[in-house]
Image: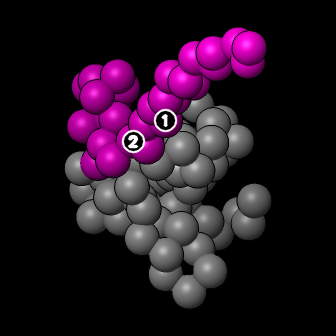
């Protein structure tokens, strides 16, 4: 870390509208890998700015309140396979 860089507190991050994956991980107290897993699953929405995914702080706070009601989560519904009838 550059000595001139200031370390953001979670309060500083909450005051922002968008945050980076590192800041999102800090807010949710998880690692970067988990943030990217949640992003890939669609559990937390993101905005792509240039090549950097950015997360809305409001969405992260909503996810932290109730992870089971993930915002925009893709749900995979398995269809029942048709029963085969034996050939005579």
Kindly report the secondary structure that dominates the magenta region of the rendered protein. loop
Res. 28 in view: no
Q: Nearer the viewer, mark 1 or mark 2?
A: 1
| First to last magenta residue range | 59-88
**Tag 2 residue:** 73
Query: In what quadrant of the picture does the C terminus appear?
Result: top right
Q: Is residue 64 magenta?
A: yes
Q: Nearer the viewer, residue 9 or 64?
A: 64
> Residue 43 location, x and y as percent?
43, 41
Q: Is residue 38 magenta?
A: no
- The residue lying toward the viewer, choosing from 44 and 75, is 75
Quarter holding the N terminus is bottom right
Residue ID for mark 1: 76
Q: Residue at x 61, y 66 (%)?
A: 5
Return the residue found at the far front: 88
Give the colouring mode of the picture.
Answer: one colour
Residue at 56% from the left image edge and 86% from the top image edge: 50
- The front one of 27 and 37 is 37
- In the drawing, does residue 75 fall left or right of residue 11? right
Q: Where is residue 56 drawn, in percent x and y?
A: 33, 58
CA–CA distance between discs 1 and 2? 10 Å
């Amino acid at each position: 870390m550059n000595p001139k860089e200031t370390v953001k507190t979670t309060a500083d991050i909450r005051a922002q509208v968008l945050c980076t994956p590192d800041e999102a991980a800090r807010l949710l107290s998880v690692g970067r890998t988990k943030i990217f897993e949640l992003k890939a699953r669609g559990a937390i929405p993101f905005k792509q700015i240039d090549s950097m995914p950015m997360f809305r702080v409001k969405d992260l706070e909503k996810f932290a309140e109730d992870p089971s009601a993930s915002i925009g989560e893709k749900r995979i519904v398995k269809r029942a396979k048709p029963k085969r009838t034996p050939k005579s």
